[in-house]
Image (cartoon, rainbow, N blue to C red):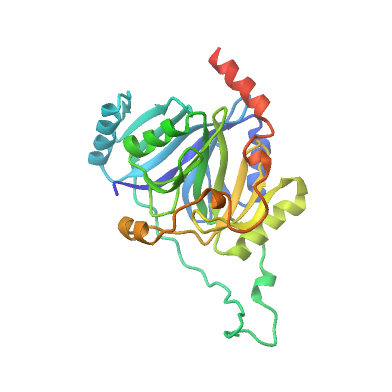
Amino acid sequence: MSLHRLLGFRAAVADPTALDAYYAELRLSGNASSGYTGSDGGAAVVIDEAPFRRLIAVDIGCHDDHDVAAVQQRLEARGASPTRGSASVSVLDDASRVLITVRVAEPEAASAPVDLVTPNTLGAIVRVDERSPAVFGAPRPPRRLGHLVIGTPDLRATRDLLVDGIGCKVSDEVDGIIHFLRCSTDHHNIGLVHSPVPILQHYSWECDDLDHVGHTATALYRSDPNRHAWGVGRHFAGSNFYWYLRDPSGSFLELYSDFDRITDDAAWERNRAPLSLEHAANVWGPNLPPEFVVPADLAELSAGWATLAS
């Protein structure tokens, strides 16, 4: 695969200071201009200030200039007008209004493994006469930014640009409902859903296991219960555990663990069970909240986009 990782994204929010404080509680490193990262570094979230929240740009890494040239060629063959840099190519998705850039970048550094707590299960008791070490865990930073989901008014157009033009691969999709695309071995780095106006629907940070998710999310939740949005549950697409929280800008922030990895495209296609509409949200956990489909700030977002268009 010529693409090899998500490099990060740039978003605009009305109050970067509030978001910075929230990220400090989450124990992320960095700042708004250099980019916020998890404990492993890697993909970064850069934040600008603007009257309303919106996703501005997504950056994807590739191996070399030949990969950049191939992306440019595919985009031009589709009738797009990409901009070529010294080691990058960029194109604006007319539907989502997101600038997609593919640039030459080093592969993602390997993450160091951690010692995970082995659970007691019937038939395999590994802990007796003591509490699980997991109950003594504490909040800690997520390891890395894993993926984001874009809300777009023209789902098919954005999907085709990313797949046929940029070169992302399709991991799972329910046509017209949701698409999960990858630019790395992660099950998805970019998800797409329909939205009346362009939005950053949610973005996700990977944790070591469900206890890591739980300890870290609980600290944010107990500080402000209104931050809780959805979870805990397990997705079908990606197979991961999740807990969604609201960030101060109005986007959803997901903490997740136990994600599908795809290293052999043919094997994935042979082994995967097709994604059904029934499982587009989850396989267990609370029902999908209505605001995941219709954002609570939709009127504000619509007014902001109308102002930009005028």
**Percent x, y for residue 278?**
56, 51
Q: Is residue 125 above or below residue 203?
A: below
Q: Residue furthest bottom?
A: 129
Image position of 64 (left or right of 35): left
Query: Could you tell me residue 33's position as x and y percent?
Result: 53, 36
In the image shown, does 35 or 301 lie closer to the viewer? 301
Q: In x, y percent, where is residue 130?
A: 69, 84
x, y percentage for residue 309? 54, 15
Relative to 289, is 116 above or below? Answer: below
Q: Quadrant of residue 79?
A: top left
Q: Nearer the viewer, residue 287 or 37?
A: 287
Tell me what residue is drawn at x 67 percent, y 40 percent: 290
Q: How many marks?
A: 0
Is residue 142 among what the camera can see? no
With respect to residue 60, does 221 lie above or below?
Answer: below
Q: Quadrant of residue 86?
A: top left
In the picture provided, is 178 more to the left or to the right than 26? left
